[in-house]
Image (spheres, rainbow, N blue to C red):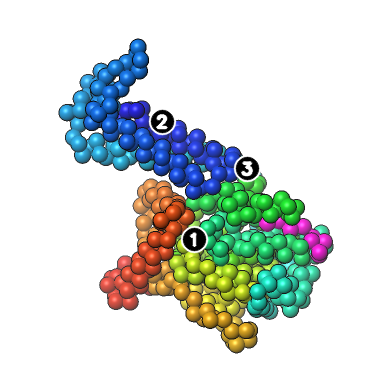
Amino acid sequence: MSFLLDPPTLFILGAVLYFIFKIFHVRKLWITRLSAVIVCLFIFISVLLYLDVLRWQIPFIMDMKGSEWMFHSDFTGINKADVPVALVAVMFCLYPLWYYLGYIAAQYLSRKIQVENKVYALSEIKSRDNPKYDTFSVKRGTNPRKLVRESLSELGGIKKFVNEGDRVLIKVNICGGNPNRPGSFTSIEIADELSKLVKEAKATPVIVDADMIWTEFWPVAYAEGYAKWAKGAKVKLVNLSETKLAYIDFGGALKKIMISKELLEADVIISVPTMKTHLLTGVTLGMKNMYGTFPQMDKAVYHKIGIEEVIYEVNRVFTPNLTIIDGSIGGEAMGPLSSEPVDFDTIIASGNVVVADSVACILMGYKPLGIEHIRLAYEAGLGNANVSYDLTQVEPHKKDGDWERPSLNATKFYNELIKTMLKYPTMDVFFNLVADFAFYDMATLPIFENLTPELLTVVNDIADDLVLSGRIKKGWWPF
């Protein structure tokens, strides 16, 4: 161990750990623990060498003072006394970075992207040919399978949306969830029952999601139970990031963007999100769920454009033919990954994603038009966000209209701050590193997982207070 050899060694070890993670589907929690042990061991032994507590000895080959080995004094001519202690401290602080860079490098290099050299037009998206229905159904009870069937029956049955022989892409929330928190990812019961309904219509269900910077598809699919379920149910489970990709001309803010050909070739698209809150968008429902179809792991590019605008654009182009919002167990408070489970016993279904999301907002306590991406979709004619829903139409629940939820002032503040940060060079790399740690690691690691929701609540309250008090100056704060 030395200041010259430790960085490349840590880099290589980080890369090796990533491949172990990927090949054996090891839960990220264990990878994080092992990574912490490796980095701490390197730092601990290297500090002892630097302090000359240990000597560097290789029998019959080498025997020197620890500090001489750390600086390779015999080759470099640099001795311990020549280097300020502050600089040495910085060099030790960089050890976790070398390790993490190896992990990230392996993550990107291992991706086999197959991109077709063609730009598709909107007219080539099969699912756009199907009619859209604005009717909706809200069902409540303790049997989610029964609620799915009842809600679809009220809309006219699954055959109103799915024809015999159709390939049905069912976008669930897997990668946006926390395996330790029910209500942060789509219930397998809902996915299973919907898959059965699609099969009963003599069509083929395909359950999909895509890699995110903090959660790769397969490890979290195993951790949540989706991989085991899909194998037993004989339902195809697909990581959109591993499929053949192509470009499509979105027009609008997105212009030409890479997407999975699975979306192009699906006869029907069904969005099946869990019903939960989100720090950056207020809610994450049917529309936000479709944002998860983008196959790129690095989502910083979309935050540069504006996440709300991107959510609207993907739903404008790949408009779900059916949306089923899983509120059997929802997630309130500081979602998406640190959300608190809510036994809400509710299923919302509609042929129009804007309508479904608007009804869900009312049940959560938000005004639909207060959610930016819903407002954009409504103003563009994508669906009715002024839908009227009386909370007394279903059996009352103590959380009706009263979910603990992020302040919309704070969400706007966060989004504007991120957009401003991402204008600077290399900030997208920093954003991804922070997102990986703050969104997933802090939401899943012991100690942090219980502390993080409280910390996020405090930050949310501070941001809300700054906006309401006017301490964020007009001109920098555009809202």
Residue annotated with mark 2: 9
Cβ atoms under marks 3 and 1 closer than 8 Å: no
Q: Are marks 2 and 3 in contact (CB under 8 Å)?
A: no
Mark 3 or 1, closer to the camera: 1
Q: Where on the picture, by quarter, is residue 53?
A: top left
Whichever of labels 2 and 1 marks the residue nearer the N terminus, that label is 2
User: In the rendered structure, which amino acid carries the disc numbered 1?
Assistant: Leu
Cα distance between the residues tagged 2 and 3:
31 Å
Residue 142's spot in the image, x, y percent?
65, 74
Q: Earlier in the sequence, mark 3 or mark 1?
A: 3
x and y, in percent, of residue 400 in the image? 54, 81
Three-letter residue code for mark 2: Thr
Identify the disc placed on residue 337. Answer: 1
Given the current orientation, which residue lies at the most extreme top position? Answer: 60
Which one is nearer the viewer's eye here, 335 or 66? 66
Q: Residue at x 73, y 76 (%)?
A: 150
Give the magenta range: 199-207
74 relative to 427, above or below: above
Is residue 318 in sight in this rendering? no
Q: Quadrant of the C terminus?
A: bottom left
Task: Please tell me the numbered disc located at residue 114.
Answer: 3
> Of tags 2 and 3, which is closer to the observer?
2
Vertically, is 69 above or below 419?
Answer: above
